[in-house]
Image: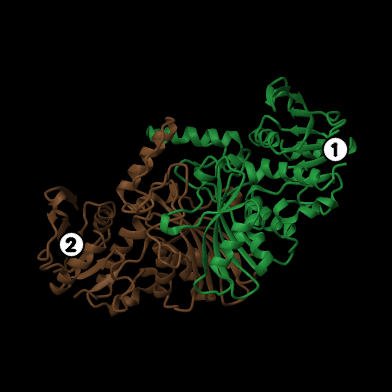
Chain colours: A green, B brown
Amino acid sequence: MERKYNFAIVGATGAVGERMISTLETAGIPIGEIKLLSSKRSEGKKILFQGKTVTVEEATENSFEGIDIALFSAGGDVSKWLIPHAVKAGAICVDNTSAYRMDSNVPLVVPEVNEDALFKHNGIIANPNCSTIQMVAALEPIRKTYGLKKVVVSTYQAVSGAGVAAIDELDRQTKSILAGESVKPGVLPVKKGLKHHQIAFNCIPQIDVFHENGYTLEELKMINETKKIMEMPDLHVAATCVRLPIATGHSESVYIEVEKLGATVSEIHQLLKDAPGVVLVDEPENHAYPMPVDAVGCNDVFVGRVRKDLDNPRGFHLWVVSDNLLKGAAWNSVQIAQSLVKKGIVK
Amino acid sequence: MERKYNFAIVGATGAVGERMISTLETAGIPIGEIKLLSSKRSEGKKILFQGKTVTVEEATENSFEGIDIALFSAGGDVSKWLIPHAVKAGAICVDNTSAYRMDSNVPLVVPEVNEDALFKHNGIIANPNCSTIQMVAALEPIRKTYGLKKVVVSTYQAVSGAGVAAIDELDRQTKSILAGESVKPGVLPVKKGLKHHQIAFNCIPQIDVFHENGYTLEELKMINETKKIMEMPDLHVAATCVRLPIATGHSESVYIEVEKLGATVSEIHQLLKDAPGVVLVDEPENHAYPMPVDAVGCNDVFVGRVRKDLDNPRGFHLWVVSDNLLKGAAWNSVQIAQSLVKKGIVK
């Protein structure tokens, strides 16, 4: 008889949780039981999964009996509270929060980059930050062939990374401004922050809180997670993260310097075409390049604007776009689950 | 008796022309005659200048008799057609188009950076591209003290750089999307281009047309103009230019490497505070940094998010914001006129 796998999704009613459900439905993993878990507030909600109605239950310490794989996307505090209980109950936990990402005992995985790190898990696997995932997926095929010395990235990030309240705020503020009314920001850059800024028809160079070194946590995540995933502690990574008035779809302007001399744009095009999970969109003559509106709803990472630097023979430029709720979150978690099954890591 | 200066403004009814008029009114230059020139379409329009009504005239080859300084912002073709006639009539021409910028006989001037280049004029002075001006104004005080090896910039540019039609398109598309209707793009990225893209709730990694090397003209302008203005032909400059759904105000994420070791963030803060035309806004603890909505209507260049790179002791990051129609265009042209008067270059 076919082995089936029991899943739990914690945070099932959130924007990422909804996408975990929809991508898991068609991921080709034989599903036995599925538990959709949430806070008390969403308990009782009915959700269709592979044609069957599933009732959302409140997540508790006792929710994980018999679960093989648990996907978490309900905030860092919930992960810290419930994951130890889920691990004790025998589940492998894939955590989409930052709670365990930099823990040296926890693999931080983008399957296209470091799938084999999954073998080192101790019950927990961390899903990287959205902006990191799409960048390393685009860089890995280039690194494998040419090596990598330096990455300087500037991001163009959608508000959905800050949750449903931020999407609502962008919508509300945009309507107010078009009506000639004033706006009263209350969510961005950081919901619990001391001050809020207009996002409609503006951009905010702050994502998450500031560290004392002047970097935001989002910037530090990109820097530190990239080094961990690529297993390159000495890679030079620099990041500036900026929030834009876009609902969904993160873009990144990435400048890299490779180790080997002699790389060409057409060779890099071929590497990207052959890379799993990457779609090359790079036809300047047709005004074709990746854009957020085209990436929304797709699992892939789109790469274009590949150019050789004009002054540095090792320098190249890339423009990388992906749906931050899919490859940046839900889909990468479900891909990790696929790998756990495919590699026989989940018993 | 006080020497008065006769001015002509070509393209007086455009977005930049309007701002040339308003900034010239209060620039402290004693104005004699003012000629407001336009295409036949806007002829006869009445505009108030320093309390007097001026009637817009059609710009012709004979418009420049007796003019001391002519400011041009009516497109490259008009500049190429009329500037030779204006020069012959004895006017010094300040051209806000790209027509003469890379001409080795034409100084390309940002007064805070290379005011003395004005002395080398042969009747024409070029006003740099908007995104270049704000960047070099922010970099010059740092370069003077620490030298400069490398600049990697990613831009976040407003639609007003593409003219009034692009502002209208952003407005129209935004309303359509909020109403659940489809959009029919017709202006961006390039009005006469073969294909147009949605700008509302999106970003477009193309500004101006593509060169065969894969760079856009906007990117090449930033690279080549920066080297010319700073008189550093060997400076490593890399640029990626992106259009955002913002009406006015360009932002830039700028990574630099300086020559000298040992620079600190607090020293760079002090250099920026002391720099002419630059305003430091850098208080992460108060969520204070430059943003387009705060820069609109101001002549200054706002700089914040100053950070030391975590991996390269020569590396620093800056976030630079300015009103692209003012310091990026009209105000820089009027400042050039101020300098021409102050330095006695206009006889």
Q: Position of residue A200 (x, y in %)?
A: 47, 40
Q: Position of residue A315 (x, y in %)?
A: 57, 70
Give me the disc on residue B8: 2
Q: Are marks 2 and 1 in contact (CB under 8 Å)?
A: no
Query: Which residue in the rendered view is the most extreme toward the front?
Result: A1
Up/down of B15 relative to B256, above or below: above
Q: Amino acid at mark 1?
A: Ala
Q: Amino acid at mark 2?
A: Ala
- Horizontal relation, residue B166 to residue A343: left or right: left
- B6 and B196: which is toward the camera: B196
Q: Quadrant of residue B63?
A: bottom left
In which quadrant is the N terminus of chain B drawn?
Answer: bottom left
The chain identifier of the residue carrying mark 1 reads A
Q: Which residue is mark 1?
A: A91
Up/down of A65 relative to A129, above or below: above
Is disc 2 surrounded by few (<14), some (14 to 19) or many (20+) residues within 10 Å? many
Is disc 1 surrounded by few (<14), some (14 to 19) or many (20+) residues within 10 Å? many
In which quadrant is the C terminus of chain B drawn?
Answer: bottom left
